[in-house]
Amino acid sequence: IDPTLDLYAEIEKLKQQKNAVILAHYYQEGEIQDIADYIGDSLGLSQQAAKTDADIIVFAGVHFMAETAKILSPTKKVLLPDLKAGCSLADSCPPHLFKKFKESYPDHLVITYVNCTAELKAMSDIVCTSSNAVQIVESLPADQQIIFGPDRNLGAYVAKKTGRDLVLWNGACMVHEIFSREKITKLKERHTNAKILAHPECEEHILQLADYIGSTTGILKYATNDAATEFIVATEAGIIHQMEKDNPTKTFIPAPPNNTCACNDCPHMKRNTLEKLYLCLKNEMPEITLPADIIAKAVKPIERMLDISA
Ligand code: 13P
Ligand code: SF4
């Protein structure tokens, strides 16, 4: 790419020419968030993907998110700036092993967290996100037996909140398991008025410290509406860009990770760059494609989720 090229202007031009929309997750680089038509959490992004009238969806996020957009809008072209932008949580649940796991609980209903492959969604009864997982479990009869996967931390949080006994798949997100309880506690001693905000993908011992637990959108809204002026943020650091933009007078401190990790960035989310986004819109690749039978099966549990969350 010519280094003098104004990527913002070029992306805007291509967007108009091609009737494209850019959907971005809060964990993307700030400059990608700034050019997006919509920024949101996983629920908001799938709602947008389902209702857009654009011909092309550029998904600035990770693979499972772009797949979900394709499942909801199969006639549209869905592009992902870097096909290698995966997810450690989705990887922690290989479909062939989950199939066996499911077979050993034949009377259980399967709820899968949206952070999983399309194949896994095709094996599910209902999909959920971090913002509606509690609501979705509560929408089911109290005696309904449930398998929840792939995130054991979100699953344990939902089980505690709803009082239900969920059978959990043993998966986790590499970013949300790095936080140090000890270091957060010490930080809080120095910032006594700071509120601790955590994503439910964090481990139980971190969630115990939190003043608020929620999805990225929930965390952003809480920080905006709460009277506190300092917040310790226990989730991927990309969200802080939007928190600072919406609240220029407040201070946001990334929750400290344990000694083995340098920062709270998701290496998968951060594979996307403004340059790759420009190239993918220009060349209309890499494109997300899925077998028709997977789309047909996976759309049902996602639509069931969207109906419950409407
Ligand atoms: P939400 O934005 O839905 O809270 O999801 C967080 C996440 O880990 C996405 O990868
Ligand atoms: Fe997956 Fe975790 Fe990265 Fe989200 S933050 S994409 S759950 S690895």
Image (cartoon, grey):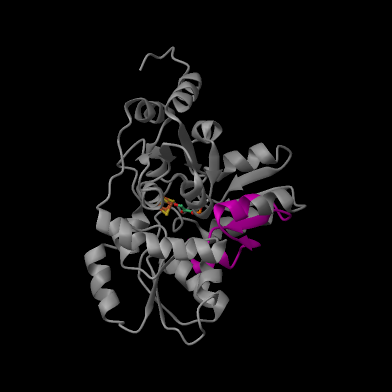
- Residue 309: horizontal and vertical position, in percent? 55, 63
**Region of the chain picked out in magenta, as a range:** 191-220
- Residue 292: horizontal and vertical position, in percent? 26, 54
- Residue 141: horizontal and vertical position, in percent? 51, 83
Q: Is residue 120 left or right of residue 183?
A: left
Q: Does 292 lie within the magenta span? A: no
Classify 59 as above or below 9. below
Among the 4 quarters of the image, the one containing residue 193: bottom right
Classify 56 as above or below 232. above
Which of the pair 195/148 is nearer the observer?
A: 148
For the question of whether residue 270 can be seen, the reply is yes
Which of the pair 185/86 is nearer the observer?
A: 86
Which residue is situated farthest in the right direction here? 227
Q: Residue at x 68, y 40 (%)?
A: 246
Which residue is situated farthest in the bottom direction here? 143
Classify 167 as above or below 231. below
Q: Does 196 lie within the magenta span? A: yes
Which of the pair 309/257 is nearer the observer?
A: 309
Q: Residue at x 35, y 30 (%)?
A: 280
Q: Is residue 101 left or right of residue 226?
A: left
Where is the C terminus found, in terms of image quarters? bottom right
Which of the pair 11/275 is nearer the observer?
A: 11
- Residue 95: horizontal and vertical position, in percent? 26, 64
Give the total number of marks visible in the rendering: 0
Where is the N terminus found, in terms of image quarters? top left
For the question of whether residue 202 can be seen, the reply is no
Q: Is residue 309 left or right of residue 150?
A: right
